[in-house]
Image (spheres, rainbow, N blue to C red):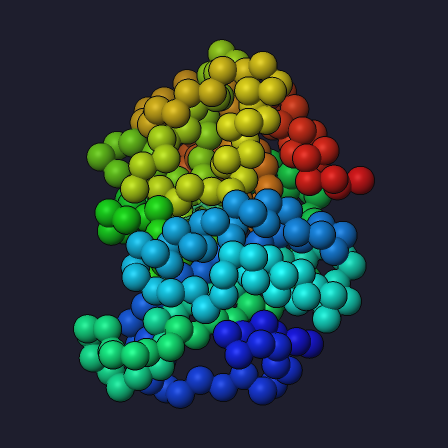
Amino acid sequence: PYLLTDQGFVNRDELYYPFEERGLQFGDGVYEVIRIYRGNYYLIKEHVERLFRSAKAIKINVPYSKEEMYEKLDELLTKNSVETDAKVYLQLTRGSAPRDHAFPKDVQANLYAYVQDLPRKVEPLQNGVTTITQPDVRWDYCYIKSLNLLPNVMAKQEATEKGAFEAILHRNKKVTEGSSSNVYLVKDGIVYTHPATENILHGCVRMRVVALTTQLGFPFIQAAFSLEDIAEADELFITSSTAEIMPVVKVDDIQVGTGKPGPVTQQLQQAYEKDAKIP
Ligand code: PDD
């Protein structure tokens, strides 16, 4: 398997980093997870744009131009003969240098991207998943897709230990997002989600959900909802590049709506499959 790096393509076993790497020592970097259906990227433009936004926010120069990035990412798929459902993990760090909190002078950014198989799991998409709630203890700049994922990892682990699929995070009683997803509530045919402020990641699937919901004729309101609102909700769902549009049927001990995926979520799932050209 080939990896894309800032030095071009290398064999998977040939990628080496010195132990003084700022991604490893400080989490000083950003990343993307891009979905592939049948060998084709989905929402590639949204992901590349966000990569550049995240990098700019923490003052890292992406070693490729946007145009080059698109070309290299395409080449990554052809070189690895990707024809199935998969994902690309791309990581960009400030680079390797003797450890010092401040940016080292003349440091070169490290970038790598690789492909992993990701077959679609249809069962949870059809039946929904359970979730737990956790306080959102992250910093104020969650719109940056930063490598600092410890709060997300701890929240997801809590969910996993409770047999749940995702941890829904809340700050000042308002739901922000999931540990690795965006969260939406449906009430009386209206879809609500946290506004795209600095407190959440602006999900690429979220951007499509805004458009698809509107196309389907459902009002979409970007306003935060509270934990108490969940008890009154008709439907709840989460989205991400890996989870797609995933119905949530339980939050902690509370059953959502009828306890089964609802009609608005299901219509959005169909619209998503069409949009992503999933057969
Ligand atoms: N996570 N919010 C958070 C905190 C996320 O980590 C993610 C994605 C999302 C959804 O973003 P998108 O629709 O662009 O995938 C929201 C990826 C999948 C991950 O960390 O593996």
Residue found 66% across the figure and 67% down from its top? 76
Residue found 35% across the figure and 24% down from its top? 223
Quadrant location of the C terminus in the rendered image = top right
* Residue 56 position (above or below residue 262): below
Task: Residue 33 in the image: state x and y as whole percent.
Answer: 53, 56
Task: Out of 234 and 277, give the one closest to the viewer.
Answer: 277
Task: Residue 243 in the image: state x and y as whole percent.
Answer: 58, 45
* Residue 131 position (above or below residue 53): above
* Residue 269 seen from this side: yes
Task: Out of 107 and 193, give the one closest to the viewer.
Answer: 107
* Residue 168 seen from this side: no
Quadrant in which residue 211 is drawn = top right
| Count of residue discs | 0
Residue found 29% across the figure and 45% down from its top? 136
Quadrant in which residue 183 is drawn = top left
Task: Residue 111 in the image: state x and y as whole percent.
Answer: 47, 71
Residue found 45% across the figure and 49% down from its top? 50
* Residue 261 position (above or below residue 181): above
Task: Out of 266 and 110, give the one closest to the viewer.
Answer: 110
Is residue 94 left or right of 88 when viewed as pictured? left
Task: Residue 115 in the image: state x and y as whole percent.
Answer: 64, 66
Is residue 250 left or right of 152 when viewed as pictured? right
Quadrant location of the N terminus in the rendered image = bottom right
